[in-house]
Image: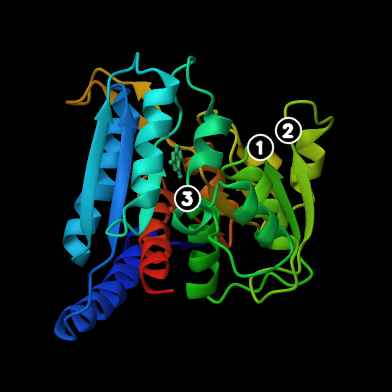
């Protein structure tokens, strides 16, 4: 069993970007600038956005954090996005999800200019991605592909089972794994809450991507010997023994699943770390294209 070390690979991606940004600076060119919009004070969202901003600083990007109260009116948020779209100094825009009920996520996503949509959530980017055209690929699926690529994991002809059909992870990764690319050519089964015989389907999988957001859902009896397991879950679970009062759990019961795997991502230090690296990669593209 080999651990797919997301922290290590993310660091390599970030180092590479830093070299490129230093080169831009030397040539007197503008450095990439990411605008992050955070609404409300959801603890997990705060942590993610803080990590994204911190990573910008590490690499040498400019970043701007724009905060709104949880009760912000939709039109105020949309107005801000339009301002960011029109601002030539801003290369990439991300609005951290989820958003409060009074704001329609769909409207927010479609208001972001497609060429600044470094999250890859805009329908124009999703459409291009599906057709295999150059596009911003959503950060978590992109991070998974970078991880597979780094460890030279052969995906061709493998049966990949994706659990979870979210727009952010499950659906895009299922498409990407099926495409005719070096990290694709899988036969993909996309499972969700109405899937029957999930255990039996998972047992047929060469690759399992667990992206349903249920802590320790995937257990050893659902995984065949030698499978590759990618754990996308990052749920906060109350744990009074921890200083913060919670522990971070993946969607995979790591202790029992790991011994059966050829490769597995840990939580933390797996896909989560790669998500931010992939976002930084998209932001570099947005600034230099
Ligand atoms: N919420 C959970 N994952 C993501 C992500 O990748 N991007 C944004 N903007 N919000 C998220």
In the image, which is nearer the foreground, mark 3 or mark 1?
Answer: 3
- Asked if residue 19 lies left or right of residue 204, the reply is left
Marks 3 and 2, how far apart at CA: 23 Å
- Asked if residue 224 lies left or right of residue 66, the reply is right
Q: Which mark is residue 119?
A: 3
How many marks overall?
3
- Asked if residue 181 lies left or right of residue 46, the reply is right
Q: Which mark is residue 192?
A: 2
The earlier-in-sequence mark between 3 and 1 is 3
Rendered image quadrant of residue 5: bottom left
Q: Which mark is residue 164?
A: 1
The earlier-in-sequence mark between 2 and 1 is 1
Q: Position of residue 237 (x, y in %)?
A: 38, 23
Marks 3 and 1, how far apart at CA: 19 Å
The earlier-in-sequence mark between 3 and 2 is 3
Q: Position of residue 173 (x, y in %)?
A: 64, 53
Foreground pick, 283 / 243: 283
For label 2, being within 8 Å of ligand 1 is answered no
Which SS class for mark 1? loop
Is residue 95 in sight in this rendering?
A: no
Marks 2 and 1, how far apart at CA: 5 Å
For the residues labelled 2 and 1, say whether their Cβ atoms are less than 8 Å apart: yes
For label 3, being within 8 Å of ligand 1 is answered yes
In the image, which is nearer the foreground, mark 3 or mark 2?
Answer: 3
* The C terminus sits in image quarter: bottom left
Q: Position of residue 186 (x, y in %)?
A: 76, 64
Label 1 crowding class (10 Å Cα cut-off): few <14, some 14-19, many 20+? many
- Residue at (81, 40) in percent of width and height: 200
- Residue at (53, 73) in percent of width and height: 149
Which SS class for mark 2? loop
């Amino acid at each position: 069993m080999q651990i797919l070390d997301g922290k290590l690979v993310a660091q390599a991606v970030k180092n590479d970007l830093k070299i490129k940004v230093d080169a831009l600076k030397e040539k007197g060119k503008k450095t990439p600038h990411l605008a992050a919009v955070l609404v409300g004070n959801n603890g997990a969202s705060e942590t993610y956005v803080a990590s994204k901003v911190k990573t910008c600083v590490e690499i040498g990007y400019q970043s701007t954090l724009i905060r709104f109260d949880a009760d912000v009116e939709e039109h105020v948020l949309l107005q801000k996005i339009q301002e960011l779209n029109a601002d030539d100094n801003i290369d990439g825009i991300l609005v951290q999800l989820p958003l409060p009920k009074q704001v329609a996520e769909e409207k927010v996503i479609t208001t972001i200019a497609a060429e600044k949509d470094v999250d890859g959530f805009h329908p124009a980017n999703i459409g291009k991605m599906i057709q295999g055209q150059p596009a911003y690929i959503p950060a978590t699926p992109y991070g998974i592909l970078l991880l597979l690529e780094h460890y030279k994991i052969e995906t061709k002809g493998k049966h990949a089972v994706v659990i979870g059909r979210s727009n952010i992870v499950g659906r895009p990764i299922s498409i990407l794994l099926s495409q005719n690319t070096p990290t694709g050519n899988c036969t993909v089964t996309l499972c969700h809450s109405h899937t029957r015989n999930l255990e039996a389907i998972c047992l047929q999988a060469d690759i399992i991507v667990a992206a349903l957001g249920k802590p320790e859902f995937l257990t050893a009896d659902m995984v065949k010997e030698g499978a590759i397991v990618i754990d996308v879950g990052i749920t906060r679970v109350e744990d009074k023994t921890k200083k913060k009062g919670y522990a971070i759990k993946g969607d995979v019961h790591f202790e029992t699943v790991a011994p059966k795997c050829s490769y597995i991502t840990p939580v933390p230090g797996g896909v989560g770390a790669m998500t931010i690296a992939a976002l930084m990669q998209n932001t570099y593209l947005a600034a230099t294209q």
